[in-house]
Image (cartoon, coloured by chain):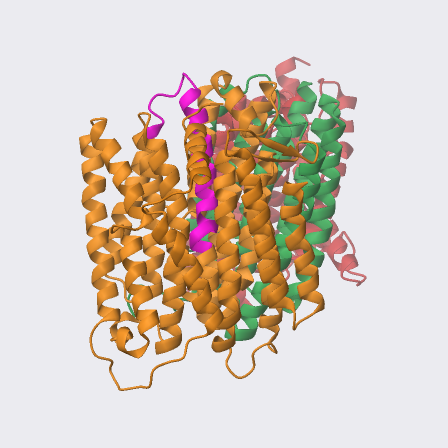
Amino acid sequence: MTLAWILIVPAIATLAALASRRAAPWVTLASAVVVLALSANAALMVAGGATLHEAFGGLSLDALSAVYLLLVAFVGVTAALYSIGYLRVHDAGHEGTTPRYRAYWPLYNLFMISMLGVPLVSDLAVIWIAIELTTIFSAFLVAYENRSAALEAAWKYVALTSVGAMIALFGMLVLYYGIHHAGQPVTWPGLLAAAPSLPPALLLVCFVLWLVGFGTKAGLVPMHTWLPDAHSQAPASICALLSGVEVSGALYMLLRIYPALVRNPGIAHPGNWYLVAGLLSVAVAAFLLLQVHDFKRLFAYSTIEHMGVILAACGLGMGAHELGTVYQFFAHAFTKSFCFYAAGMATIVFGTQEIAKVRGLMSRAPVAGWALLLGGLAIAGAPPFALFISEFQILATGFATGQYVATGLLTALLVLAFIAILYQVGRIVFGEPAQAAPRMKLPASSLAAMAIAFVPMLVFGFYLPPPLQALIHQAAALLGGTP
Amino acid sequence: MSPLARYLVINLIQIGFLLVFAPLLQGVLTRIEEIIQGKHGPSIFQPYYDIWKLFGKDEIVSEESSWVFRFAPLIEFAMPIFVVMLIPALTAYPLFFAFAGDMIAVGFLFAASGFFVALAAMDTGNVYGGIGASRTRMVGFLAEPVFMVAFFTLSYVANSTIPYVVNASWAVSWAAMLQPAHLLVIVAFLLLVLADEKRLPVDNPAGKAETAMIGHSKNLEYSGTGAALMKWGGAMKFMTVLIVFLNVIITPWGLAATTHWSDVFFAIPKVLWKMFLFLLVLAVIETTLAKLRLFRISEFLASAFVICLLAMGVRLVGMG
Amino acid sequence: MPTYLAIDGFLAALFVVFSLGVIATRQMLGTLYLFMLNSLALTASAVLIGIALGSPHLFWVAAITFSTKVIAIPLVLRWSAGPQIYERREVEQVLTIPVAVLIAAVLALVAWIVSAPLVHAISDRPFAAINLPTGLVAIFFGAFTVAVRREAIAQLMGILIMESGAFFASISIVNDLSIITEVAAAVDLPVIALVIGLLIRNIHRVTGITRVGLLAELKEHR
């Protein structure tokens, strides 16, 4: 019953949060912790390569989905903890009384259910519904500020990602026919089993529809326009969830169809699609990073860049790339959520998100300053953080397999993004504050959340616990197409 | 009677059918609309009285006008008579003049009368005539490409632009009737009929304000015989367009299949019955829609054009 | 079977015309009515294919489509954003309507050409040759509606038409969708309509307009 409980617990928390306004934050936090424990337990069970099935096959979990499940559960805990203090400061004066604050916690739990559903549900069409629901439930979380800019961002987010979702739905339904016609259940293993016998045109059309549809949700260029807007307007805790796990949920779909494409004999070089789409996103994001004016948009573009890196890494192919892809996917969630927490602190300190107006965070609030600096280093891929390992792995594999052009290009763009991020972060963190102001006192629960988020971001750069190591290797094997 | 002579006589019967019943259609349409609007309305024979009365009146012609002004009513009156000889008004088989012109020729004949009427409207120097004529031309220019594409789509289906052949190609089976291309052409053609006959929502036939008129300002300067011919000719043009729409495009049934006199005469009530049903639809459209602003007419016709293109596309990709 | 195919083609043509109407119509309420008509065409096609193939599943699809799209969604929208929808207002466009419908025609042709290999790959489903290209046309039209219409309601209709398009295509090929999927889809759509309707109401409350295309505060350069 583990898998079912992972979905039931937040559902109960939703009802509790609706019932009791006062207890809502704590109930949500408790539910997130329980979900993390259950997810870790479930992930341990599949780390050896097994697959869990529950609810008459309606729910299932394998290593690759367990990786995603763990990420959602972990960021879910830190984001819940972070929001408790962050929203209190943010709504200073009337915390807990505004309707939007009351709606926040139930919606947070619903959002978590929908995201947890993506890795847990077996049926592909139901997974599509879960992904669409992540958009729907998070719409009001993005619009939390309730200013016209926030509503505009929320509208763009909902409209564009729903358009993408509908395109993906078409691909999904055609794929449904193909898998069903091949006599397989419409699940990920069924897709893999059916893949060799599917008509190549059918599989390829489905994939292209997914690439456009889920690519919109994953913020791939040129469908990325909603992403910086939504991330600059949503509260930092929601940004962490959106950027860290929701966006990569759509990418997860694209990663999972990859082995099916590889196994179909009629499709030559499926990796090239991934490579081109990925490199395009990395390139555009790297150049946009140089000219951002808003530090939350900075991290939003960095998300686009990372989605591109994951996709390009997947497309490099040739055996050993999977490990880099999965690790990048894994490390991005921890790192990016931490970055947004730090950015949220900086917003609290300065009351603005504009880079030009923000100087000397280090002297105003040293904790936030250090956090933003370390987060910037980590997301840019500096050692010893986790993303360094994955990016190094990807590039090393790419060069080792002789794909000099693509890997060289990726390297150059990563260097460019590295410079851009550190340049922008440096402007915020160092320098003299515009006016002398007292040191800010930052909310304790948010600082605690940042401390928790910091641990994996740093530690996984040089040490990975054996069970996690096994899990990631299993997931990489699944991505490689081992049934 | 030799078959050829018989065909000729049937052709004459068609012309008589047109001449006699055209004003009736106008009267019935007005009456239906009045009833829908909760009024009693004039007698359905009112257009006959009007035409009769106008024939008995003196004609006043502006000294400033030229021969075009006096010539235009004759053209307006004569063109529908030519056209009805080319289209299947009562018979499903081609008659004497059937191959003298195709649907594009029908378009040209109407264009010729439209040209003269527009010139005549400007001829007297009356401002309203000029405004109306230029607006009519604007609608005409926008409608013409649509007519062309509609005709081409029809001929693409039937491999011919002769209306008799087109109508036979729909009538073969239900499957042929229900083709998507056919439906799309019907929708587009309905929009065209509304625009070309200056019905709502393009133009308000019952409108009395000269500044808002599009098609109806052409009659403003006419009196006596000229006005009677214009009115009668307009009614006949309306009926001819309905014949094309109903007998060729939507409902290719109810036409005489043989050359027996009884068959031909029984076709008259059947065709009139179809027209009555269509007038009901038209009356509902006209009483529920508001008139479009002048520059919205291009949107209306662009939609018709696109629907035609879709019909063509459906044929091209072999779906319909 | 040819008669079924012909009637299905007829419904497909209606489906496309109603989708085109959502791009071209001026009246805000008109877009909602056209969407409902569009859903009726989808329902009818599902019933027809269900009869032709003897598939009771498609009757379910038809019933769910009818109850969600023709009944539930208009009700939900009336409840959540009623005054914003039911006031008589014209929808603004980025492009003029003639240009928009001409582009739509090109999109339709592109959709037909693009779907040709797919139809070829699915040769064992007789209705796929009609429904698959038509569904793709509606998806293109819906996306185009979102792109060219500045009004939130019209954009929502575009998104819903895309969904209908995907289902219009799928009823011809997937006539055995699992019940859970159908129920989930049935719940999903009104939820989408509800949330987007509430979002529209909030946008109207805060900014005073629902012409989302005019909101342009978020830019890279300030």
Nearer to us in this view, B123 or B274:
B274
Q: Position of residue A434 (x, y in %)?
A: 24, 82
Relative placement, left or right, of B305 versus A316 is: right
Q: Dividing the picture into quarters, in which one does residue B20 lie?
A: top right
Q: Is residue B35 magenta?
A: no
Q: Dividing the picture into quarters, in which one does residue C55 lie?
A: top right
Q: Is residue B254 visible?
A: no
Relative placement, left or right, of B215 versus B3 is: left
Q: Position of residue A338 (x, y in %)?
A: 39, 59
Q: Which chain is green?
A: C
Nearer to us in this view, A128 or B82:
A128
Residue shown at 54% from the left, 26% from the top: A189
Tell me the magenta residue range.
A242-271
Secondary structure that dominates the magenta span: helix
Image: A100 above or below A200: below
Image: A183 above or below B47: above
Nearer to us in this view, C34 or C119:
C119
What is the quadrant of the N terminus of chain A in the image?
A: top right
Q: Position of residue A135 (x, y in %)?
A: 53, 53
Image: A482 above or below A90: above
Q: Colour of chain B?
A: red
Q: Is residue A249 magenta?
A: yes
